[in-house]
Image (spheres, rainbow, N blue to C red):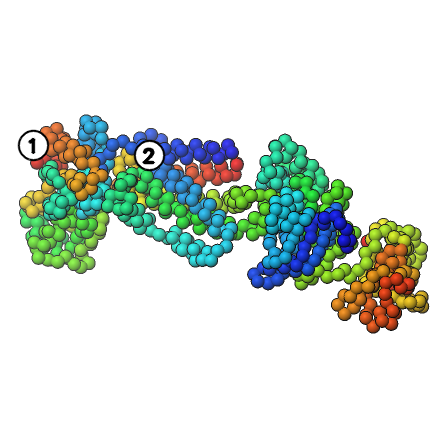
Amino acid sequence: MGVLGRAVGLLVSGDAEVWFITWTSLRFSLSSTAIACAAGIPLGVLIALTRFPGRRPLLAVLSSLMALPTVVIGLIVYSLISRSGPLGRLGLLFSPGAVVIGQAILAFPIVLSMTASSLSSLNPLLPEVLTTLGASRRGIFWMSVREARGAVLSAALASFGRVVGEVGVAMMVGGNIRWYTRTITTAIALESGMGEFELGLSLGIILMITALGVNALLHWVVRHE
Amino acid sequence: MSDGSATPLFSLSGVRVEIDGHTVLSVDSLRLEAGKATILVGENGSGKTTFLRLLNGLLAPACGSVEYQGISLFADGCRRVRSETVLVHQDPLLFRGSVGQNVSYGLRVRRVPAASTARRTAEALGEVGLPGFEHRRAGRLSGGEMQRVAVARALVLRPKVLLLDEPTANVDAASRLVIERIVRSTLAAGGSVVMSTHAMELAYRLCDTLLRLSGGRLWPCQENIFRGSVDRRDEQFTYFRAGGAVLRCPAMEGDFSVAVLPVDDVIISRAPISSSARNQIEGVVTRVEPEGALLRVTVDCGLPIQALITRAAAVELGMDAGLPCMVAFKASAVRLY
Amino acid sequence: MRRTSLIMLMLSVILIPLSAQPVRLRMATTTSTLDSGLLSVLDPPFEKLTGLTVDVIAVGTGKAIRLGENGDVDVVFVHDRKLEDRFVAQGFGVNRRDVMHNDFVIVGPREDPARISGAADAAGAFAKIAASGSPFVSRGDASGTNAKELEIWDRTAIKPRGAWYKDAGQGMGEVLVMANDLKAYTLSDRGTWLAMKGRLPGLMILSEGDPALFNPYGVIAVNPQKHPDVNYMAAMQYIAWVTSVQGQRIIRDYTVDGQALFTPDVIR
């Protein structure tokens, strides 16, 4: 109760820094989830609706990519955007853009493989029914997503959950810079490193409340389209 | 089938459809007339669904040509078929959302203005006997209601050709009647219907052409189908008038419009014979065609009656076009629908 | 359609701030400068003066120098003289300046099972800890403190191995918390110790004052000839600031619970 009370206290007291890191966490994870969805949902639909050689191995690789540790993704992104890396000239390291890119890479296989598997469970007749009613390829795409929207939403939320709670990428390529790239998770790492366990737990509760809010909001949006 | 000069609705020649390397349908030559009801019968897996999908341009044959109103389906004809024909699948597969959203889907795809979309949706629902169902959840309907919504979803597009795949399977009696009524009204409005069904009674009642599919091939009809009406009744028989003939049929109560007589049950002789056959009608042979090891003989008795006879019998009878003969069959061989 | 535009609006609100970039100075520093709270009094006047924003990336000295070698930061503010000299000698860093110093302290359980209390000689204290087999937590993270600890072990000629020697691989704060829980000894910089001792009831300073425990901090600009994209001018402005009389006074006057944490090297 003490920790919970402190978490709520931190939020309602309007502590500017707590609000800032909460907003930063949300901003990064929503942006990266949006990017991952923009790329992953269409590709997932494509994989689900088409048949090509190597499709099954591809799906297996994709779902095993979901297990990739965040620190490894952080390392990969770091080595790409470090000044000594191939994309160093962009000056992205230790900026919000870097975190968003890394988290989008983290979220992408989740969105892609969950979308693909949820659409594979749709009635295989759907494209044909849509075709005979006059749908174009685009129409088939959108109706497939719409028919599987609960599962597609789950994919988006699962990737949001993984991203908002990850610390590896945010720490490694974001640098945990105060008032800039510090997120709830990197702040927790920092506070617990300094022995501030209670503050760390309070931040953890704030993270959960935030994630819960996003879940509820998206469910509401999908239900009341 | 007439070889009239009018362009047929569909014409198929040398068509073979393969799925996973297996031939699932092959049709040497077939013409379907516009404005008619063509009914496909045959057991499950006989190729009925494949046939309908082929006509709708949903699958391409491995070889052969399919033409819709004289234009190849796999050239310019496809767009035409897409805009003028709709297939209603056996699995109604309603989309998530309301009945109205389902029925109006094709109109929305065609960017029909909202006002007329709403009006046409309401009309189509009325036609299938589900007026005012627009706001019902599609997932909460009964099987028969779902099938009727699927039919409405097609009807709303006002297709010239309605393709129905087993619309009466797994539905209640009321829904069956609705489907039958819609087939009739489509024909009455000048449209064409191609429908597959297991319900033989429905098939006999509705068909202008009955196609029997088995093992992916078309087979000649094994029954004579006569349209007509009940002339009179007595204690022993129902007298059914079809064309210029009156058939003695088993005594049955009810109103009938179709008499079905299996070709196997028809006996042909040079002179009247004394037998248990209660129908003996004079006629003239108009046509003799080989069918496998047998011959299919058409006799004009005021209406054309077909029979199958062996080649030996044909030689014995001196069978040829123009030959006067007697046609005999038992009253109990005739079924009324 | 309305929903789509709403989502688009939300997305643009979220994404636009990602591209807004004021001029930033990236500094890799050790956890001790950040955790002690010094930077939160030292940097804001500099930011006000120059209009720059200082991005502090707090990592171990080893990693901070590595970030400098890769050109990922503009300036490093660290405390491992050997590594710093190598960094400059290899041409990655230029214009190294002494900023300040404090010292390391050997902390351990109040019961002091190895009886090192009052020992002025750090190597001697380490040898006693090893001999008694009392637990010792090492940073093990290639930080400045870790380097100093290994340097002291080198002097004792003991190779620290065994169940008593916990190679934690964590930051100073985590290691102090572990030592408190395990009733173990450890080496800490004085700044972090002072900042955290209120939460470490089981620990106390047992040995301090050996010149070997001297802990000098240096600031180094990343060589713009190696990495043309670094913000060299800003790095030099920062070095000028921390070695200015004004900056040095801030360092001198910074206290936690009434105790000064760092001694400036330029002023008295």
Which element is circle 2 on?
A: helix
Q: Answer with left or right where residue A28 lies relative to residue B196.
A: left
Type of the residue with mark 1 = Ile
- Determine which of the numbered discs, if any, sits on residue C267 in the image: 1
Which amino acid is tagged 2? Ser
Nearer the observer, B189 or B153: B189
Looking at this view, is A159 or B157 the one in front? B157
Name the quadrant of the N terminus of chain B. bottom right
The residue lying at 87 percent from left, 66 percent from top is B268
Q: Residue furthest top?
A: C49
Relative to B333, C127 lies left or right: left
Image location (x, y in percent) of residue B163: 68, 49
Instruction: Bin the neighbour count of mark 2 within 10 Å (Cα to Cα): few under 14, some 14-19, many 20 and up.
Output: few
Q: Is residue C163 left or right of residue B26?
A: left
Q: Residues within 10 Å of mark 1 (few under 14, many from 20)?
A: some
Q: Is residue A123 above or below residue A199?
A: below
Chain identifier of the residue bearing label 2 in the image:
C
Q: Position of residue B274 (x, y in %)?
A: 94, 68
Q: Residue at x 63, y 59 (%)?
A: B16
Q: Quadrant of residue B159?
A: top right
Image coordinates for residue C64, horizontal then vertical, percent: 19, 44
Q: Residue C248's quadrant in the figure?
A: top left
Q: Chain ID for label 1?
A: C
Position in image of residue A223 (x %, y %): 52, 38
Residue at 24% across, 34% down: C24
Q: Is residue C95 above or below residue A120?
A: above
Q: Secondary structure at mark 1?
A: loop
Query: What's the mark number on residue B168?
Result: none
Say left or right for A119 vs C243.
right
- Mark 2 and 1 residues: CB-CB less than 8 Å, in contact? no
Q: Which residue is mark 2?
A: C19
The part of the image, by quadrant, that contains residue C263 is top left
